[in-house]
């Protein structure tokens, strides 16, 4: 009887590459049919604008595309995106860089699993769960710093595991570079390398060296930066419930598949058999997951833990002896289909994210019919799109900070939206030297108002104060004329 051939290393790599290719191309292909070749979401437009500015004019000292300006906060991602933008254009670069980082991250993650000691079946199952995860799709479909820093973290950790001193030194360089992305990532780097050192490596000097250098970055880079700029908050401000926020199948934007969560619980129970040897690792894993409750983007790191535990559960089910093989095969197929369903539904959902072609048309009109100093007022969620596409300053955008000025601007913005008093509205719009008001359909659909023609959406009918200049199915543009004629 002929023996069944085992899958080769090259077949694994080719399969993972092709699967990654399909998963990462899908959101952009679906979006191209629906809305054209625009980027998905808000934050990518901020990074695209800054990177375009760096490639054309050099490093800015101040971001002038927000009312009153703000100091430019260094972000290593801009200096990865800018050179690619010079070659391919900023839109293509903003798709190509996350795509390349995603492909490479999958392969490096697979190598890390091998070095840790997972067998081939476990490695394949873990990587497939990782590829099907909504977090993976988000991280490498949206142009944000996370796509680059995750690759640097994985690459640095992989090199940290190697015995050769040259590779260790290269890992130090890579992880130090990654530590400049954020304090949170700096902490994760230390947690990750500490966990490996405690579980597998008796040489503590490597971790001590890394900790010393990373600590130096914190005290000499982040501490002065926070004194100068204050603590910047996350781009996304969410009011979702905890369960909804963490489960994409229930509507969460950045979270886990409910099927992967259930599998991870089973995987944790299976892995608990090695608790005496790896209890420190388990504590660190729990700490990282708990961190996700306080910092939403930490789910990007937690996703590796969920993927590993889910993969362990799947491989255990495959290896287990079943009395009826057809039940075994159908059960495993059902689990894979469930994970695939979550991935497909999430991909379709994010591909339909704003901005739409109609919104971009409205912003293009503003760009073509205004001066560069004209300020646009709208909801802060539209800020990055105004700054990128219209190339005009916005009163507010989603890059929030804790300064008193920003809090005052948020409060004034809320008053402008809700006010029925035309005199109060005129006073506040004049205060911020507003030239145009942009109102979108989703602002009247819960983003600002519960129904049309409330507050500012009603007051724009006042012909002495506003002049309607542009309108389509999604967006309307009004010129604020009172402060110029008054």
Image (cartoon, rainbow, N blue to C red):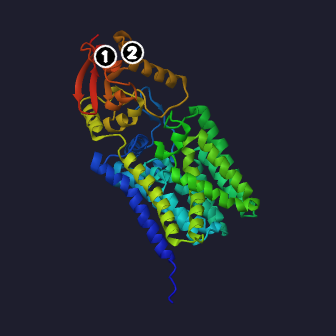
Q: Are marks 2 and 1 in contact (CB under 8 Å)?
A: yes
Between 154 and 350, which is closer to the camera in this rendering? 350
> Badge 2 is on which residue?
419
Residue 232 drawn above or below residue 1: above
Which structural element holds mark 1? helix
Rendering coords of residue 342 (x, y %): 45, 52
Residue 73 drawn above or below residue 395: below
> Badge 1 is on which residue?
459
Res 184 quadrant in image: top right
Dot 1: within a 10 Å radius of its alpha carbon, few (fewer than 14), some, or many (20 or more) residues? Answer: some
Outermost residue toward the bottom in this view: 1
Residue at screen point 50% across, 25% down: 406
Rendering coords of residue 384 (x, y %): 39, 36
Residue at screen point 55% across, 28% down: 402
Which structural element holds mark 2? loop
Residue at screen point 53% across, 67% down: 124
Q: Count the marks.
A: 2
Residue 122 drawn above or below residue 478: below
Residue at screen point 35% across, 44% down: 352
Residue 347 drawn above or below residue 234: below
Check the picture and name the quadrant holding the C terminus: top left
């Amino acid at each position: 009887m002929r023996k069944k051939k085992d899958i080769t290393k090259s077949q694994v790599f080719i399969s993972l590459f092709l699967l990654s290719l399909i998963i990462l191309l899908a959101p952009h292909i679906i979006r191209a049919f629906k809305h054209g070749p625009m980027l998905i979401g808000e934050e990518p437009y901020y990074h695209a604008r800054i990177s375009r500015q760096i490639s054309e004019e050099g490093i800015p000292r101040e971001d002038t595309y927000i009312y009153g300006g703000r100091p430019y906060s260094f972000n290593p991602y801009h200096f990865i995106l800018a050179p690619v933008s010079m070659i391919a254009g900023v839109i293509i670069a903003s798709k190509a860089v996350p795509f390349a980082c995603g492909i490479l991250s999958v392969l490096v993650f697979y190598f890390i699993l091998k070095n840790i000691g997972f067998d081939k079946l476990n490695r394949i199952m873990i990587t497939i769960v990782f590829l099907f995860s909504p977090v993976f799709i988000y991280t490498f479909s949206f142009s944000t710093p996370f796509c680059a820093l995750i690759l640097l973290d994985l690459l640095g950790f992989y090199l940290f595991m190697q015995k050769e001193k040259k590779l260790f030194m290269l890992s130090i360089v890579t992880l130090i570079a990654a530590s400049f992305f954020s304090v949170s990532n700096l902490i994760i780097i230390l947690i990750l390398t500490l966990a490996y050192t405690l579980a597998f490596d008796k040489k503590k000097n490597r971790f001590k060296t890394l900790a010393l250098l990373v600590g130096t970055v914190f005290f000499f880079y982040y501490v002065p930066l926070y004194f100068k700029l204050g603590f910047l908050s996350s781009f996304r401000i969410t009011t979702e419930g905890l369960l909804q926020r963490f489960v994409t199948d229930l509507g969460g934007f950045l979270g886990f598949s409910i099927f992967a969560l259930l599998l991870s619980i089973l995987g944790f129970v299976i892995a608990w058999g090695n608790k005496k040897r790896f209890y420190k690792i388990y504590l660190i894993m729990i700490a990282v997951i708990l961190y996700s409750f306080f910092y939403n983007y930490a789910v990007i790191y937690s996703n590796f833990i969920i993927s590993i535990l889910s993969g362990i559960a799947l491989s255990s089910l495959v290896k287990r002896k079943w009395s009826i093989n057809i039940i075994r095969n159908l059960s495993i197929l059902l689990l894979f289909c469930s994970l695939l369903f979550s991935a497909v539904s999430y991909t379709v959902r994010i591909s339909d994210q704003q901005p739409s072609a109609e919104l971009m048309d409205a912003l293009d009109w503003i760009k073509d019919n205004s001066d560069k100093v004209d300020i646009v007022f709208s909801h802060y969620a539209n800020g990055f799109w105004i700054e990128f596409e219209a190339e005009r300053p916005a009163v507010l955008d989603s890059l929030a900070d804790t300064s008193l000025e920003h809090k005052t601007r948020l409060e004034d913005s809320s008053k402008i939206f809700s006010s029925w008093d035309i005199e109060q509205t005129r006073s506040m719009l004049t205060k911020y030297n507003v030239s145009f008001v942009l109102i979108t359909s989703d602002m009247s659909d819960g983003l600002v108002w519960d129904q049309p023609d409330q507050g500012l959406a009603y007051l724009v009918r006042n012909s002495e104060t506003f002049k309607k200049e542009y309108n389509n199915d999604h967006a309307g543009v009004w010129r604020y004329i009172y402060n110029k004629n008054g």
